[in-house]
Image (cartoon, rainbow, N blue to C red):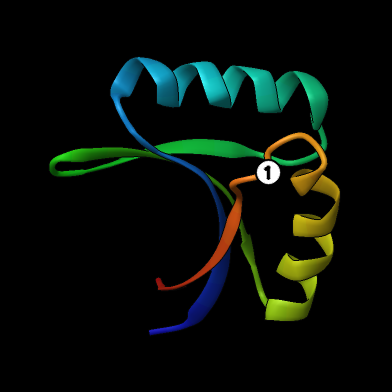
Amino acid sequence: NTVVYKIQLYNGTESEAYKIKNNFTAIFPEYKAKIIYKQPEWKTQVGDFETKLEADRVLLLIKEEFSGAIVLEDLI
């Protein structure tokens, strides 16, 4: 298993998760957002960043538009 870092923009309903993803993609086309479903919640996440530092740098940019964004550690 490899540790990666993701930025979570949203956690909640399906319709809102897709709305956030579309808004994010319009503002930050250079980063790929994806929808993940883990019962019972829908999550909008960005990246697989190799280091926390890299994720934190992108988080600083994203937080201006998505104030609730957080960095999460994940295993792939």
23 in relation to 48, above or below? above
Residue occupying image coordinates x 74% and y 41% = 31
Horizontal relation, residue 67 to residue 40: left or right:
right
* Position of 53 relative to 45 (above/below): below
The furthest residue to the left: 39
The x, y position of residue 36, in whole percent, is: 35, 41
Horizontally, residue 6 falls left or right of residue 65, namely left
Identified at 82% across, 37% down, the residue is: 30
Total numbered labels: 1
How crowded is the residue under tag 1: few (<14 C-alpha within 10 Å), some, or many (20+)? few
Residue 5 place in picture, x, y as percent = 57, 70
Viewed as shown, does residue 7 lie left or right of 31? left
Query: x%, y% of residue 14?
Result: 31, 22
Q: Nearer the viewer, residue 4 or 39?
A: 39
Could you tell me residue 28's position as x and y percent? 80, 32
Considering every residue shown, the one lying at the far front of the view is 67
Q: Residue at x 58, y 59 (%)?
A: 70
Determine whether 71 is above or below 9 in the image. Answer: below
Image quarter in which the N terminus is found: bottom left
Residue 4 lies in what quarter of the image? bottom right
Q: In the image, what residue occupies the spot 76% across and 18% down?
A: 26
Callout 1 amino acid = Ser
Label 1 secondary element: loop
From the image, which quarter does the C terminus lie in? bottom left
Question: In this orientation, does residue 51 appear?
Answer: no
**Residue 27 in sight in this render:** yes
Q: Where is residue 39, by image quadrant? A: top left
Residue carrying label 1: 67
